[in-house]
Amino acid sequence: MISKPIGNPIIAVSVRVYQTLLAAYPTKFQQEYGSHMLQVFRDCCLRTYRQSGTNGMVRLWAVTLFDLIQSAVSEHAHKEIEMKKEMKPEDIRMAGWGLMIGAAMFAIAMLAGYLGDAINADLWMWSSILTPFICMPLFLVGMLALRSRYGEKVGEVANNILLITAVLGTITSVAGIFLAGIGEFWLLVFTGPAILFTGLTFFGVTVLYKKPLARWNGLPLLAGLWYPIFFFPQSQLSILFTGEPYIENVNTFSATLSVALIVLQCVTLFMQGYILKSDVPQEMTAA
């Protein structure tokens, strides 16, 4: 803990920012070591500023940020290993059910948005509510179960990409709700799934190559592929940053293609949930 106020504003701001950045560590790690790390950083700031001034603080921050990112990733990796050890077959089965339910709800959400546009109704609100608060948390749990079930055979790189995109996609989608009143930031609600499914697509490519499943090794790729194909080429992100519409006149063909890709996304994701639900470790061992 910091025992007394800091007079120098540069040091005070640095300590406050560092205290905020400590949130990147797992909660248990913060509780055990957070106050000590904050005190050490404060002492380093005082000594560095006294010896080298502002230039020294810049160098200190460069080293500190590198060390913080490296150690935070390491601690989360350690936590992830512990989670994998604790994840029981019943948890994986429930996560499979979660993927199936999430896929069905996502289909309802996306199709409600399209139907609302077609009949000039407010059905898009269902899409905006279901996607960040129901679908994305279920998808996140499903991705963690996929990593737990097949991660050892797939490899660390694909596992980490899936974890990062799943967490980032969920946060992005939820953030879109709270930023909905600012410009076109409401599109973040639907950018989140694109990020998550892009990570699943990469994970699926690795699964297809290493073949950890007894069968259907191409399914994770198919379960992640379709929504990014639908979302990114339409340049919806350009609306977010430029305010310009990505398509001035949406024709029947493009609308039909978009709906078809969403249906494929949800069907293959539902199948992935079913495989995950059925392919529990005891059954694989028995086989």
Image: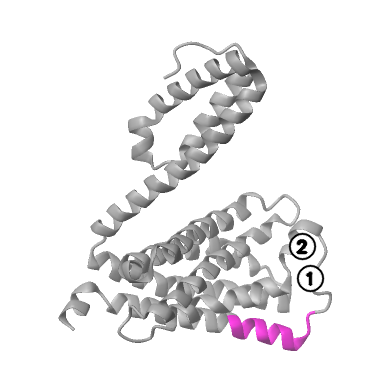
Residue 49 location, quadrant: top right
The residue wearing badge 1 is 246
The residue that appears at 64% across and 77% down in the rendered structure is: 230
Report crowding for label 2: few under 14, some 14 to 19, many 20 or more residues within 10 A (C-alpha).
some
Residue furthest front in the image: 51
Picture quadrant where residue 118 is located: bottom right
Which numbered marker is on residue 117? Answer: none
Local SS, label 2: helix
Q: Are marks 1 and 2 in contact (CB under 8 Å)?
A: yes
Say which residue label 2 marks. 239
Q: Is residue 109 above or below residue 216?
A: above
* Among the 4 quarters of the image, the one containing residue 83: bottom left
Q: Amino acid at mark 1?
A: Tyr
- Quick one: SS at disc 1? loop
From the viewer's side, name the closer residue of 76 and 106.
Answer: 76
Of labels 1 and 2, earlier in sequence is 2
Viewer-closest of 174 and 203: 203
Please tell me whether residue 184 belongs to the stretch shown in magenta. no
Q: Position of residue 208 (x, y in %)?
A: 43, 81
| Relative to 153, residue 63 above or below | above
Q: Is residue 118 left or right of residue 222?
A: right
Relative to 218, 8 lies left or right: right
The residue shown at (38%, 76%) is: 273
Task: In the rendered view, tell whether residue 59 sits above or below residue 138.
Answer: above
Q: Main secondary structure of the magenta part?
A: helix
Q: x, y percentage for residue 113?
A: 64, 72
Q: Which residues are magenta?
A: 250-261
Q: Rounded to the nearest whole Å, what is the CA distance between mark 1 and mark 2?
A: 7 Å
Amino acid at the residue labelled 2: Ile
